[in-house]
Amino acid sequence: MELSSLGVRLSDEMIVVGMIFIAAFLLIQSFLVPAFGENRQVQKRLKKRLRAISDEAHQGSISLVRRKYLRELGPLERALESLPGMERVERLVEQAGKETPAYRVVLTSVCLGGMAGVAGLYLLPLPMALLLGLAVAAFPFLRLTRARSRRLARFEEQLPDALIVMARALRAGHPFSDAMHLVAEEMAEPIAGEFRTTFMEINYGGEVRNAMLGLLRRVQSVTVMIFVTSVLIQKETGGNLAELLDGLAAVVRDRFRFHRKVRTLSAQGRMAAWILSLLPFVLAGVLSLVSPNFLPMLTQDPMGRQLVVAAFVMVIIGILWMRKIVRIEV
């Protein structure tokens, strides 16, 4: 009897933990990402465009970033970098603006997850210890993803000023590569580093097309895609590139201003979504502390379990519905 009651209690705990995990995951995905992010259709078009140009870009010479990166690694490190999946991790590190080798990120994730899982075995049941290990193992990747998002937001904020600087340099008679070098010298990171890398690839004999596609591959943004496409079309067909960059800078600046306004107007809705979604779990925690015998009466009864499942389904539907309301696709 004691073993059966212990098994029921552990199953109840796992159900509650699973519910909290699913709700928290949906809340983070729905309301912690930028409210003015690209909509799904735009993201699909951007990914399709990147896939279309990836083969073409890889057919050219290897980029200076990749060449320098491989040259500084030892034989063992190169072997680790050749493992499956390391290329995606390396791309994430590069987009985040970090210089940590990809294999170190993976090893750090495995070590942290393993230590957290082993420590959790002494304090928690096996499933909860596994969840704890996976959550801790994902921390390095979540940190890189957050750094990439911040770097991309900062890059897009600097892009209008960079385009204006380039347009003025072109009007003064400078070639396109020198205009990019002027941006790299006059502006701050991260746009200075990306333009400097692109300028070096062009200046050391690389093709403008491959260098610009490399910039788009490192900074995956719709505004950067428009900038790269405009430059490539102008190189093939001709035209007034300075005037084109001025117009693009005005459009990007107005778009960024509108995004901030949308984020401000949707802040109240996001806060309401967090409060309404977490309120049932907070109330259950308070009741379990105040009256420990209250919740077991609900979970041990078959009808009570059905009510708990129905309430959780309604919470998930509410999160998805509020996400649809709050996330304004621009």
Image (tube, rainbow, N blue to C red):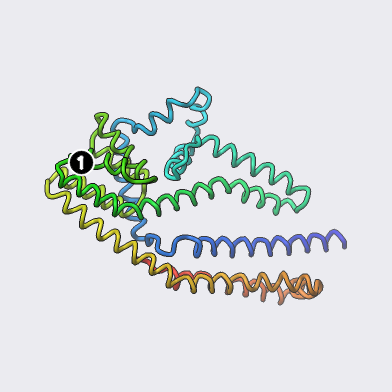
Left or right: 267, with 193 as reference point: right
Which image quadrant for residue 55? top left
Which image quadrant for residue 328? bottom left
Q: Is residue 241 above or below residue 291?
A: above
Quadrant for the C terminus, please.
Answer: bottom left
Q: Residue type at mark 1? A: Phe
Nearer the observer, 239 or 191: 191
Q: Is residue 310 above or below residue 101?
A: below
Quadrant for the N terminus, please.
Answer: bottom right
Q: Which residue is pictured at 62% across the width and 74% down the height? A: 311
Neighbour tally class for label 1: few under 14, some 14-19, many 20 plus, Cα within 10 Å? some
Q: Name the residue tied to disc 1.
A: 176
Pinpoint residue 137: horizontal percent, then vertical percent.
61, 46
Pinpoint residue 220: horizontal percent, then vertical percent.
36, 49
SS at badge 1? helix
Left or right: 208, with 303 as reference point: left
Q: Is residue 80 above or below residue 51?
A: above
Q: Which residue is pictured at 27% across the width and 39% down the height? A: 181
Nearer the observer, 171 or 122: 171
Nearer the observer, 228 or 119: 228
Q: Which residue is pictured at 73% across the width and 64% down the height? A: 12
